[in-house]
Every structure is written in C-alpha cells, then in structure tokens.
Image: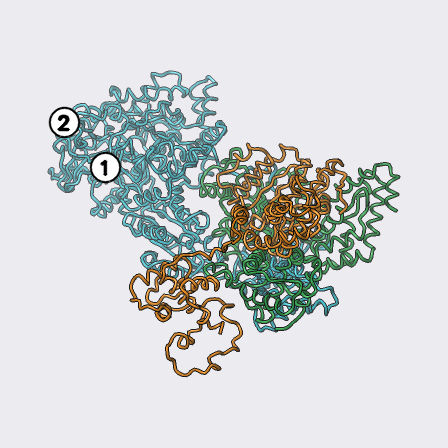
Amino acid sequence: MAACLQHTGYDQERLLHVSDKLPCRVFQAGTLLSLMGEPSQYSYPSIFLYGHRSTGKSHVVSTLLQELELPHATVSCVECVSAGLMFERVLLALFGPDTTSLLPRSPSLSDFVRIYRQQCPQSPANQTRFIVIEKAELLRDMDANLLPVLLRLQELIEDNVTVILLSEIVWDQFRPNTGCFEPLLLHFPDYSKGDLQQILSQDIHPSYSAELYSAFINILLGVFYSVCRDLRELRHLAALNFSKFCEPLKEGKVKESDTHKLWRNIEPHLKKAMQTVYLREVSSVQWEELQMEEKESGAMKGLSAHAHVELPYYSKFLLIAAYLASYNPARTDRRFFLKHHGKIRKTNFLKKHEKTSNHLLGPKPFPLDRLLAIFYSVVDSRVAPTASIFSQISSLVTLQLLTQLGHDDQLDAPKYKCAVALDFIRAISRTVNFDIVKYLYDFL
Amino acid sequence: MVRYCTRNRIRRIYKWGHAPISYDRKLKTNEYNSLHISLEDLPRTTVITPGQYILIEGVDDDNPYVAKVMKLFESDKQKKALVQWFVRVCEVPPNKMKLLGRDPHPQEVFYYEGRTCDDEIDVESILSTVQVKYISPEALFPEGDQKEVLYVKLSWNTKAFSVVKPELMETIAAPSLAAPSLASPPRHSIPALPPSPPCSPPVMATPRARAPSRRALPTPDPTVMNRAIAVGGGSRRTMSTGKMMASEAESMHSASKLSASKGLSAKRRSSITRTPGVCKKLELSSPGKSAMDGDDMLCQLLDKELDEEVLLVQRSATSLTRLASQPFGFTPIRKAQRSSSSWDSVNLKPAMVNLKRFSLEMDSPPSSTQHDSAKLTEASSRELCGVTSLEEEVFDIGLPLTPKRRQATPRRNCATRGQKVATPSNRAEKMTKEPSLGVLAEAENEDSPMVPAAPTPRSSRRKSAKLVSSRIRKQLNLLNDQRDLYSDGDDEEEFLPSKKDLQSSSSEEEEGRLDSDEEIFGKKSKWGAAGSRTPRSAQKDRSSARTPRKTPVRKAMPTTPRTPRHATPSIPSRSLPARQPGSVLEEARARLHVSSVPESLPCREQEFQDIYNFVEGKVMDGTGGCMYISGVPGTGKTATVHEVIRSLQQASDTDDIPSFNFIEINGMKMTDPHQAYVQILQKLTGQKATADHAAALLEKRFSNPGPKKESTVLLVDELDLLWTRKQNVMYNLFDWPTRRHGRLVVLTIANTMDLPERIMINRVASRLGLTRMSFQPYSFKQLQQIIMSRLNKVKAFEEDALQLVSRKVAALSGDARRCLDICRRATEICEHSASNPSAPGLVGMSHVMQALDEMFSSAYITAIRCASIQEQLFLRAVLAEFRRLGLEEATFQQVLVQHQALCRVEGLQPVSVSEGLAVCQRLGACRLLLLEPSRLGILQRVRLNVSQDDVLYALKAD
Amino acid sequence: MSKRKADDSHMPIGESISQAQTLLRERLCHQRLPTRPEGVASQHKHLLELLKRTAVHGESNSVLIVGPRGSGKTMLLRCVLAELLTEADVQKTLLQVHLNGLLQTDDRIALKEITRQLSLENVVGDKVFGSFAENLAFLLEALKKGDRSSSRPVLFILDEFDLFAHHKNQTLLYNLLDVSQSAQTPVAVVGLTCRLDVLELLEKRVKSRFSHRQIHLLSSLTFSQYLQVVRAQLQLPDATFPDSKFCHDWNASVKALCEDKSVEEVLQRQFNSTKDFRSLHRLLMVSLCRVSASNPTIKPADLVDASRLFSADSKTNILHGLSILELCLIIAMKHLNDIYDREPFNLQMVYNEFKKFLQRKSHSMYNFDQPVVMKAFEHLQQLEVIRPVDVAATRAQREYQLVRLMLDHTQIMEALQKYPQCPTDIKQWADSAFA
C-alpha cells in the first residue's frame, strides 16, 4: 500500500490525516478520491461499492467526505422504513432543516426531485453533492422506482450530485427488470490476515506491551480466522478474552516471553468461546461471569440451550414417539414395536441401497394415530387416551417442538412433524432412561 | 335548505282564502283569488294571490323555481295554479349562457317565453312568496344584498335572450309592489282592479321606479315622456295581457301538438305564412315580444296614420284572441285535441269571421258556457291587471253581452281596415270614438324609437347624449345605428329561427340587434373586468356561495374553497399565429390530420340515419331510451354521433323538433366511474357537487315531474370504464330513461360488441335494452373514399398508392385513424425524398411502402441485427439450449454454459458470469428476452419474447 | 516523455490537467451535448421536422423514440430541442412538459406535475389545488379551449413511456393522445422507451389514438467507427482549450492510445459485449480518473486495468473474502449439485458431505460442530450465495431448509485459484469429481 493519498484538488496534510485514519484502505480510498475528482468537477452519477461486512466501506466513504468537508448525506436503508424518511434525511443533510417542511405528508419521488431542484440553486452548487446509501440491498424491497431514480439522479435533478451505494450483495442481483443506468462498480476486498493483525494490534491494553498483545492477537486469529473474518467480531472476541489471557501473567506464573505456556492456557478457553459466545448462545456478560465462577468450580455445566427443557412425563414420551414417527419409515414400525412380529429377513428389511438417511432429509410428516400407536408401545405403563394426552400434544405444538402440517381446520386426521434435533431428543430420552438410538432405523 | 323550508321538513297546509269567485261547469274548475298557506303549528299564514311571485319546489332545493301566479283554481279536488315562469340563471343550460355575453347576477331571473313547459302547477308545490323587481336592461343591479329580491332584465325563450318588455313587468310589478306576503283580500283587490292609464298608482309608480334608466335616454322634457310612458305602458298592458293569455293557450296547444308528427306542424307553419293578416294574428298569439317588435317595425316603416290603424287592428285582435282563447286556455290535456283544432280554426280565419263567430256566441241566450266564459274573462281580466278601459266598462255594468257586441263592431271595421291597409279617412271617426287610443297612438310613435333605444349599447347612447340636437335627428341616428347593428347582429346569430314572413323576420332582426347589443355589452364588460370570468366559473362560485354549510359540497371537496376563484382553464395563446400550410403536400397533410373535421362523414350514412331516427323520435315524443353502439376503435362511432347531434340541433333551431340539450361524458376522461354524476350535473345545470350528492340531485331531476323539462340527450363514451362492482352507475344511467318524466336519451359507445353480456348483470343489461348498433371496420373501398373525401380535389397522391394504403389497413385493422396517419407519414417521406423540395410531386408507391413498414414492421429483427456480438451469441445460446432441452424455457446457468461454449467456438474470450448476466439483462430490458427478477441470479429462467424463427432469420442474415 | 513536454508549458501542469479533467468529465457524465449525435442523422431529421411542424404549423403529433438503454434517446431529443429553440419565435411559443415514468408514478402525480409545468391558473406557488378529478377536468378543459392556430403548442415528453402504460386505465395516455388526434390545443407527445414491445402495452383504444410513428435508435456502428467515437470522446478542443501546448500533447497521446494494440483489444472486447456509449463512458471515466500531475496522460495500462475491473466477476470477488469453513461448505454444495444434479439440498446434507471429506482426507482442517457450521451457512445465505427454495417455509428446522447454490462451477474454481493460501487438500477435494 503506497501509504498516502494524493490529489490536486485537496491540500496535502489533510489527505495525510485522512490516510492514517484509514489503515489498509488507502488504495481504495485513493480510487474513490480520484473518481470524486475535484469538488467542482462532475463525478460519475452513481457508484456502487460492494464488499464483505466490515471491510470499511462506509468507514472509508464517510471519513473522506467528513474530513474533506464535502456536502453529503448518509442514509442507511435499515433506518428508512419508508422512502419518505429517506428523502427527508437527504434534504435535511444537504439543505438544512427548513426544507424538510416542504415535503408533503407522504412524499412521492416527484415531490423529492421537485423540492431538490428548488433548493439546489440556493446553496452553492459548485461542489459535488454526495448521497451515500448504506445497506443498499434493501432498496430492492422498497419502491420499485427508487433504485433506478437514485442511479440517474444526476440527470433527473440536473445538479452535480453523485449517489454512492454500499452493499454486501453483488450488483448482478440488483438490476431492475427493465434495466437502468449502470453504476460504476467498485469492489472492497476483505482484509488479509496481515491486515487484520495490524488493525487488531492497534488497540493494545495500556498496561501490557505491544508484543504481548500482538502475540495474543496471533493466537486468537489462529483459532478464529478459519471460521470468521469479520473484523468487528474478532475485535469483540479479543476484548473479551484478553483478561483471561493475562491471568497467568498477573499471577506471575509465567513470563511474557514464553508464549507457549500462554498459548496452552488460552487455547481451550478460546475453543469454548467459539462454541458459546461466538454463537451468541451466551451473552458476553454471561461469558465474563462464567470466566469468574469458573475459577471456583472448574466443572462448567452444559451451556447449550436445549440441555435444560422441562417437560411433563408423558409429553417426553410423546415427543420421543413423534421423533421416531418422523424419522423411521412407517413400514418398519412392525419390527420395532410389535412384540412378536413374524419372520422378517434382515436383508430385505435393511435396504441399504437407499442412500440418504432420514437424518439428512429431515423429518417426515406422520398422522396422529401413528403417533399414538408408537406412544402406547413405547410408554411402559398403561395410559388411557384421555383429553390430557391430546392437550399435551397441542402444547408441544405451541412449544414448537412439534409442528402441525396443513391447516388447523382438518380436525379428523392432523399431521405432525417433529421439530427437534437428535441430541436434544437424546437428552430427553436419557431423562426417562429410554435408549432411543436402538429404535432409530438410521442407526441400525 | 336553510332559507327555503322544503316540504319534507315542514308540512304546509294549503287552503283557499275565500269561496270560489267563479265556477266553470265545463271544465269543472272553481276559481279562487287567494290561497292561504300556513305552516302547521305556526300562526302566521302566507297568502298567495294572483299576480304575486312565488317560489315553486323544484329539483334543486337551494334555488327553487320562480314564477308568477296568474290564476288560482281547483279542478276535481286538486288545487292548481296557473303561472308565468321565470328562469333562474342556473336553469339556463350553461352552453346557452354564453349568449348572455356577460356574467349573470346571482339573483337574476329571466322572463320565460319558452313553450316547452306547462304552466299549470300543483299548489302543493308552492314554497313561499318572493319579491321580483324589474330592472331596465341598461341599469346596473342594485348593490343591496337582500337575498329575497330577484331581478328581471331579460326574457329567455330557450334560444335567445331578449329584452323583456317593461310593461309586461309593470303589470307584474304592480301587485308585487303592492302586495306583501301577508295580504288581505280588499287590499290586494286594488292592484287587481285594472286602473285607467293616467291615474293608476302602480303605473305612476313605475316610471319613478324606472326613472334612472329613463334619465339616461336623450329626452329633453320629462313631462311628455312620463305621459308617453304612462299611456304607452297602459296601452301595452292590454296587449301584453292578451299575449299572455294567448301564450298560455299556445303552450297548451303546442303541448298537445308535440306528439303529432312533424308533418302536421309543418302544415301549420305553411298555413301561418299564407296571408300577412293571418301572420299578424298568429304571431300575436305567439309569445309576446315578436308582436311588439312587429309594430315597432311598423312604426318605423309606415307613416303615422297607417301605424295607428294597424295598432288598432292588432289591439282589437289581441283582446279578441284573448277572449277566444280564454275557455281553451284552461282545458285540461285530455281536451287538448279538440281545443287545439278549434283554436286552429280561430287562427286560420281572418279576424272578421273570428269576430262574427264570437259575437254570435254573445248574442245567443246566455248558455252556461258563454256565461262561464264571460265570467272567466272577467275574472281573468281582473286578476290580470292589464285591461282595456272598454272592458272595465263592461265589468262596471253587470251585464256582459250588449257592450261586448257594441264595441265589437268598431273593432270589426278597424280590423277590416287593418286587413286591407287602411285609408286615412276613417282616422277622425276612430279618433272621436276612442280618444284614449288616439293619445295612445301618438304615444306609440313617440316612444317607438325608445323601446329599441333602450337596449342600444352605452357607446351609441353616450355619443348621442353628448350632441345636443333636435329630437328627430336623434331618432334618426338612433335608427341608423340600430340598422347596422342588427345587420351585423343577425348574421352572427345563426341559432335564431328563420321565418319568412315580415313580422317574424323583423322580430328576428330586432332580436339580432338586441343580441348583438348584448354581445358588445358583454365584450365591453369583459374588457372592463381584469380577471374575466367565464360564466362557468362565475356559476361555480355563485353556487358554492349559495349552498348552505350543511350540504356535502363543502365537505367532500375541502380544497375548493382554497382554489383561486378566477381560475379559468386555458392555454396561453401564441404571439404570432401558426403558419398556414403552403405547399400542396402540407395542404394535404393538414386535411389528412385526424383532427380536421370533414364536412360530412362518408361511408356511415346508414348508421347516421338509424341513430338520427332513434334520437329524433325520442325527442319528438318527449320519452327516453337507450342505445348501445359498438365497434372497434377508429370506425367513427363518436364522430357519427356528434354529426347526428349537430344536425338535430340545427333541426331544433328551426323548430322542426323541440329543443333539447346535449351532454357528453367519456369514461376515460374521468378519474372514477362515480365522477360521471358530477360531470353530468355540471354540464346540465352548472352546479358543482360531490358524486353522491350529484347522484341524488340527478335522481330527483329525472324521476319527479319537474314542470320545466327539455329532453336531454346523453352520450356516454367508453362505457366499459363506468363499470363498478355493484354497477350502480350503469344502472342509473340506463334506469333514468325509463322514468316517466325522465325525458332522457342515452347513447352509449364501447368497443366490444358483447359488452352487455359480458360485464353487465341482468338488471342493468335489461335496462340497456336491445337497441344496438355495431360499426363494422371500414372496408378498403370505404377507407379509400374517406381519404378522397378528405383530400377533396387536392391532388397529392397517386391512385394506386392510396389503394395500397387502404387495402393494407383494411386487412390489418380497418382503423381510419391508422389510414390517415400512414398517408400523412407518406407525404412527409415524399417531401424529404424529393429531389428539389420546392416541387416534390405526388406521393407514390415507394413512399407509401416505406411509411407502411415504418409503422407496421416490428423492430425485433433489426434490433437483433444491431445487437452486439455477445448479445447475438447469447441469443444463439438460448436457441441451442432450448433445442437441447426441448422446452421453451431454460435457466440462465444452462444458457451460460452454451454461451461460453459458443464463445470458444467463435474464438472469443469466454464471458464471466457477471458479464453474461449483464448481456442477458440488457436483452431482457428491451424485451427480446423475458426474465425472472434479477435477484435470482443465475437461477433465473429465460424465455424468448420473439419467435425462434425470427431470431434464426435475423442471425442468419449477417 | 509527454510529461516532460507538459513541464515546460506555460501553465502549471496540475492546472491544465484539472481543466482537461473538468471538461472531459462533463462530457462523460452526459452534461455537455455534442453538436450533433453520431450516426443518427435520419432520426434526428425526422424528429426535428416533426417537432417543428408542431411548433410552427400547430399540427398535433405523437411519436415514440425506441432504443436500448444508453443508445442516446434522451441525447437525441435534447439535441433536437436545442436546435429547435434556436429559432426565436419557437422559443417564445413552445411550451414544454417533461414527465418521467420513474418519478410520476401515477396519473394523480403526473397531472399535478403537468398543471404545474404549464402553470395553469389553479397553481399557486408550486401548489396545485383541487382534487384529482378536478385537476383532470381542468386540464382537459384548458386543452379543449385552445385551437390549432391561436394557442401555444405544448410539447409533452414522457420519459420511460412504458411505465405510463401501467397507470390505471391509461387515463393520462388516452387523454394526451386523444388531444393529439382532435382539433384542440396543438400538442406533440414524445415518448421515450427501451422496450421494443411497448405498443403491446397500450390498450387498443389508446393504441388507435397513437399515430404509430416510432423512431428506432439501433446503432449499427462498425468497430472502426466505434474507435473514432472513442477518440472523439477523449479529444480536447484545440480552439477553446486555454493551454494549447498541453492540449496538443494530450490529443497526440490520445491518438497514440487509440492505436495501441492492447487498448484496441480492450475496446474490441468492450465493443463485442455492448455497443452502447454509456458503458464506454464508464470505461473511459475510470481510466481518466487515473490521470494526475504524476501521470499526465491516459496510459494503455490504465484502460486495461479499467476493463479488467469491469470484466471481473463480482461473485468471485465476494468468494475471495469468505472464511475457509464457508469455502469448504461451498465446495460441498458443489459436489451435492454434481451428485443430485442441481436438486436443492439442506444444511444436514452439506454438513454430512463436509464430514465425509474430513474423515476421508484432511490434515489441514479439523471438525467444527454443527452450530458453528450453521452460522457459516447463514452467512452464505445472507450474502445471497445460496438461496432458500421457498422463502416462506420458516416452520421447518433451519438445518432441513432446502436451498440452492447460486454459483456457477467456473466461479467456484476461479475463486479457489485466487484464494489466499488455500490448503492443497481442499483444492484437490474441489477438483475431485467423485460422486
């Protein structure tokens, strides 16, 4: 990276200031800057920046625009539930608060363009105005005309304006069906490992040396890089786990120099982090608490959500029955649940040539009576088919452990699907000490 | 709704003031001279007496009808009243409103002289009394905003406005001045008693009332004037009353006649034009002013003696006709035939016979009928306050017969003299006999120039006022400028009836003059007022001003109050006029433009005749009906209907058929089916209202027997656009004509032949009925004929060129518009391709060919040929993939594989997926391909929008 | 070398460069009109004649300008108008109404806009009074009042004409075209569209009122002409440009550029993919932006880079940024696509495939448990690299939701080539075509 921007339009030290605000993005910033040209010059009507999440798209753009004090409006489509809001924000940012009052109640595109045209002669028009739109992929779900209009806004408004669209999705999946003005495509590549290292190493803990921190970052990346390259995520993880990393140092067990020990200390911890906090199964607060209490009681209980679901006794059996019903072929029920089924030769029973097991294809729907039949055979004590059973079924449906197919109107023969994963049902069956795997066709 | 308490709000009780003052056995009508209207649980009662002005409940609650009571009577238990109508501004059809030439005053009413409405109304429909003031045409409306007072300036006879004769109004004005709403019999009998000209308070009052206006006139000595006016007024009264009664009779008669065929009426007219004498008498019996104009003209043409004679003749004739008409005047409709026939006899015989018959009647021992008739005359003459002194005598002496005969005799010989233009000799005798008439006569020729002088434009009057000279000179130049005024007047008034005989033509001239005056008047006022408002806009805000708060008009249109009042829809006019076509080709092009309306529509004679007969029939016998016209676009449906209406209107102007008003709405020119009501209402009455309010008003108008009814012809274009889920708009449109009093003829136009079957529910379709007509697409011969008729004589095309065009179009659509457009385009091509632009020569085959394939050939093939190489390759790939799959559809991914393969074959660098998508979506954008939404990426399915053969052909060619 | 020349010119190099940039940018952003659009002389003539007849003779007309995107429809129209308005009286008389189907999305808005631009009398400031119905009636009344000779002609320009055809009942089109076919205010209705099938969108009564004049802009340039255009686009005007020396150098360099072999094949490629000028402008714009004081001319390399920027596959760019796990999942999906030819699949299958790979031969990768994989999977879905078959089916468990891969094999392979330090065994796995 030739680590400095230069452009005749702007003074040098300001550009320097900008460029050290944009580590590892100087090149992209340079291209962008050259496209913008000097403030008075026309810039291309619409520019489409695409690249992964947190690759510094909006950061670069906003830094440039702010530092160089160019008139601009930044709108994120997530915040704009209606096009009207977007217009309002744009006008507000470009022409000040009084103009937004000119907009009618639910402004149409034509209103927006009209008012913009009225306004632009008043404020100095010798500078290019920029409209930055983040999360542009959401434009596709808004008013169908919005995107084409934004793309050729310069022509429609007859003013020196440039629209910059930021998105993660590629342009190919934006084009309206009747075509539109093709924007200038610009790709923001992801940060390389080196870049990440460099950027992450910038926020060092004051009380520790830079080397230590970068070593920590190195370890962190070694664990997470293959899974996630999101800068924000990594930064978050680093912040969470650095204290743990430093524990042995605080206790004075090891010196900073010997990284191997530190690594052995932190590595399993990071693995655990990947299974939990990375998946948001525990919040970062919980995570820190865990780190605290873990010091007292080493045993860490199951964190995953499905470990602790409390169900009534029969409901558990019903759920098991449902699972069996939806993952076993109906023809195998005789073999599994009849006391003395006749002679069934293993060969034609286990047709192994059917390749994909049910656990790949997912649960199959089953009728209610099959569920009940399996239920009566799996539950040991005799149960009367009372209302309570049925109410429990429906409550399972409301818990979304079962899903009812079709509409609710077909009361005579409702069909269900089991909506729980294998290890969940395992956990359940363990509580009623029922070995479910024996009864599953896929695992024979 | 606030000011006029309508009957559905408060019940009124109607009872006669007194015992019947007379009884007609034959007609079984009791006659009364006062009617007491009392609101229940309210002490005060309103007394309606003949000669008073009343408001009569009509379709529009906000401005009910205005009329003057002529007579109150009761026939078989029904309280009836005989009225003289006045027309409100809003009742005059807006398109006629422009004849007025100026903005109408909100409280202005017009003396109604049309014949199309019966003037016998049900007493129950009387709302209350109202005050009406007469204002001479040149006077300004008083500023005072007293809502109750209405002003009369002009009279309206459904065709033109004319100055209402002051004395008509005087006779009317007298009671209205004297009679407040609470009147007691003795007091109101005073105006009822006909006073002798010089000393009657109302008459003395009237000149004072009209003093300012008269001041304006160039008359140096007021005394003479006053006398003149007084006497003249007095004398006029006699005639006017006569005319009034006559007009009643006439209207009865015409009403009965309406059903009869044109032939009959034609015969009547011919009989009218037979002898001048008859003409005179007839037009005396025809609505008033023409008679006046008649003798005005005479005053100017003949010398004094003569015109005295004639005046006498006419006057006598008047009274007679009145007497004669009396009994028939009140015959109910069922007797109409008889009465009219006998009335004809009265018409057609010269005065003497008429007189003889009459006197005979008088001689014979007083049979009940004559007695009654006498009574009637007496009564009528009493409540009509204009009466000749002679009749007063009669009434003073109780016995009717002898004096009648006595003064009948002088009349007779005057009349005879009247017939064969009289010799001066008998003047003295007549003078001695009736001094009043003598005075009257000179009064006549004193103010004869003045009556026409009244409406002359300010300019001339001011001018004449400036120069102080002798009266004669003034009269002279007044006469002059009247002449030239009416000369230019009547050539621009084509809507006037064209009668051949002297009086009517003179009357026409008179009218012409008046109207031309009005024109100037109007123009002047327009120039005067800065923001010149069209009558419509004026109308609009007038109504909005008058509508009380609670009417929905306000609510539904919140913006209307904010709309600038003076907004007139108009495109600014250009500084220098458009250039006229120069060369032959330009000429031809101008003629060939669809907009240029041809003199006549060729090739649609049959349809024209059918529609004409249909509408004419309905209008003739004032019934209603529907007709459904279908045909593909550009086959001249709307044009034909317009043609029909045009000729019908001409017919109605020449009184061949009763006048009607024509309204056109177009389904495409409204934003929502229910707007139809609004538009109809606006075009009918000029009111603005919301959809449902308008619907209510129209419903009321068409369903209940409003006294004034012209039949309405409604053209509904693009009918299918009026479809709503409940179809209530269509239902109403087709239901109104079926109402008894609807008098609505609905012509509907749409494209599809089976529209009624397809979109209409049964009750709508059945109301539409089976009168259908379908316009066939033009055959090539017809198209050719159309072009020829348009081009007439302009030689711009070669024969076979025209034939080619018409054959081609006839083969494709039979759409005349297409045909004309192609010809126009051909002329342009010819112009461009011409070697020397000055003399391009005729449009030949080649040009037409070029024009044809410009317009008809699809651009797909050329588009494909002009496409870039990659695009063409992609199309090839699509074809290849279709062939492989044997389907008409493939995903982009599949096509892409083929595409890249083709690229390698062509030795090009294979495209990346993005480029491929770009190419594909470019083709999709110009619809060579049909694509799914682009967010499907490479999974989106691709179809061809062109036939595979076309693509192959296009790709092979290069 | 041209740099040195530029140095000893009288104007500072930066100055003249920014001058040149300003000028060329305006040209490339379609701000400056060419004196005459290239290659469309006949269409130009036709349109000019047409509008002139309306403006001068007050003859009503209607015409459609049809051509693919970026083929210069608007340009043509603007040129014609500019030429037309040079005549003083036309300038005085002609009224213009510009509408755009993208902005005036329904007749209500369009009517208000028309009224505003004609500044009829029910407009105050920029407020149009009255309801929709009133506005329509008012406008029609106004147009009806006028007549051929006396009232000013109105020019209606409907950009994106096809979108107007989607308005309810096509009321606006019907009325405008009806006016153009009847003896009222003279109007010219000019529609611009890129759809060749636009006439099929019109209702037949509307269609009948349209005089079927269509001006097609289908450029049939040869490559040599194309090169000429490119050169013309980059040339600086000798006469007007302040620094004549720099201008001369620049033009010379442009000439050199256009003759360069690599540039020529870049342009050839561009020309092959599309002929429209917009995309050409895009290309030139990017390479123009590279010009600065340090390199004062457009070098062939700049152009080549620019074209590479555009021809690059964007999906591949995205793939480049994926984590190794996500990449593995994609490869697994590729295999699934091969096995069950392009049938949809779910996470379980993918995970299964992935585990098979791990068991069979992997030394670089170790197993991730399912939630982690699930997260990666969802990220892919968020990037629209994979797409659920039916978006509505939320009731099914996420791991069993059926999805499709929205990548072509070529893209995956290309991505693998570019992928930074991609483990070899993964490459092999991707290449291996076992089922």
- Answer above or below: position of B612 versus B2: below
Q: Residue furthest front?
A: A253
Q: Position of residue C316 (x, y in %)?
A: 67, 58
Task: Write down the colour of chain C.
Answer: green
> Which of the 4 image quadrants contains residue A405?
bottom left
Q: Position of residue C297 (x, y in %)?
A: 81, 46
The answer to which of A325 and B360 lies nearer the viewer is A325
Judging by the rendered image, the residue that carries numbered circle 2 is B397
Q: Residues within 10 Å of mark 2 (few under 14, many from 20)?
A: few
Task: Write down the colour of chain B.
Answer: cyan
Q: Mark 2 or 1 closer to N-term?
A: 1
The answer to which of B598 and C38 lies nearer the viewer is C38
Type of the residue with mark 2? Ile
Which chain comes out orange in the rendered image?
A
Left or right of B678? Residue B247 is left
- Answer above or below: position of C185 versus C327: above
The answer to which of A27 and B835 lies nearer the viewer is A27
What chain does mark 2 sit on? B
What chain does mark 1 sit on? B
> Which of the 4 image quadrants contains residue B903?
bottom right
Type of the residue with mark 1? Arg
- Answer above or below: position of A106 versus B797: above
Q: Position of residue C40 (x, y in %)?
A: 70, 53
- Say the numbered circle drawn on residue C280: none
